Amino acid sequence: MKKVALVTGASSGIGMETALQLQEHGFQVYGAARRMDRLSNLSEKGIQTITLDVTQEDSMVACVNTILEKEGRIDVLVNNAGYGSYGAVEDVPMEEARHQLEVNLFGLARMTQLVLPSMRANKFGKIVNISSMGGKIVSPFGAWYHATKFAVEGFSDGLRMEVAPFGIDVIVIEPGCIQTDWGIIAANHLKDTSANGAYAISASSAAEGLIKFYTGNSLSKPELVGKTIRKAVLASKSKTRYLIGYGAKPLVFLKRILSDRLFDKVIQIMMK
């Protein structure tokens, strides 16, 4: 019997590559996203697609129940849906801050709640939470984004200890700089939020830097993350964390050995 995997945020980048990797290695995969038209690449390859908005309770419940009715189980949940809302803390409207938390943290948490009863009943499950090296280190103008990823790290640690007795494992993936639209979206948010006012000069510089960096050729490809997730869910004993991709290990290492203020200076220089 094929194991069943649900991948959220599967319309592009890491989510799409993860869905493809799992399908190639024998999983019955459901790729989920808000817009079904953006899932056509997956459906053309035989992957089941399903609509999902992780900010809407009805959508999340319907997604999980539909899969359980068809398959009777969900063995792997990859919580990948998320985005980067960048802007100076002083400038970001609280409505947007709450939306960042809804997508990156509370949506992840609610999807986890919904799949756990099935996993407990089957005495097996793999919950893969996509964090970031940004759950270990911080950059200016990303305070709300980093807050969500730091929260995902702590949430995952607590969850892992709770569900281990039921045969369920929790795996945290911490990508570095990956060749996706994430940086462009973050840069656009930064421009929209802090293009004027006290932070305009440094925010505009940081936004242009993000765009230049994320349209360059030095970043790791999303296939790296997809392959890592596939290896993690297939392993009999997975690592609790996978720190991977461009810049991730050296920057997290520097964070460990430098003082906070010295690390701040390093990041500020890099952002110029």
Image (cartoon, rainbow, N blue to C red):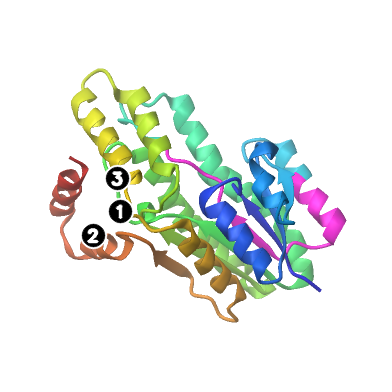
* Count of numbered badges drawn on the protein: 3
Please give the residue where the numbered disc 3 appears in the rendered image. 213
Q: Is residue 91 left or right of residue 117?
A: left
- The mark lying in front, picked from 2 and 3, is 3
CB atoms at circles 2 and 1 under 8 Å apart?
A: yes
Task: Identify the residue at the far right of this view.
Answer: 69
Magenta stretch bounds: 63-84
Where disc 1 sits, the SS reads: loop
Instruction: Examine the rendered structure and indicate whether residue 194 appears above or below residue 132.
Output: above
Where disc 3 sits, the SS reads: helix
Task: Please tell me in which quadrant of the rendered image residue 60 appears.
Answer: top right
Please give the residue where the numbered disc 2 appears in the rendered image. 255
Q: Residue at x 57, y 44 (%)?
A: 106
* Viewer-side residue, 78 vs 42: 42
Q: Counting residues from the N terminus, which is met first, the one under dot 2 or under dot 1?
A: 1
The kind of residue on which mark 2 rests is Lys
Q: Residue at x 45, y 42 (%)?
A: 181
The kind of residue on which mark 3 rests is Phe
Q: Residue at x 22, y 32 (%)?
A: 205
Q: Position of residue 224 (x, y in %)?
A: 46, 64
Residue 137 is marked as 1
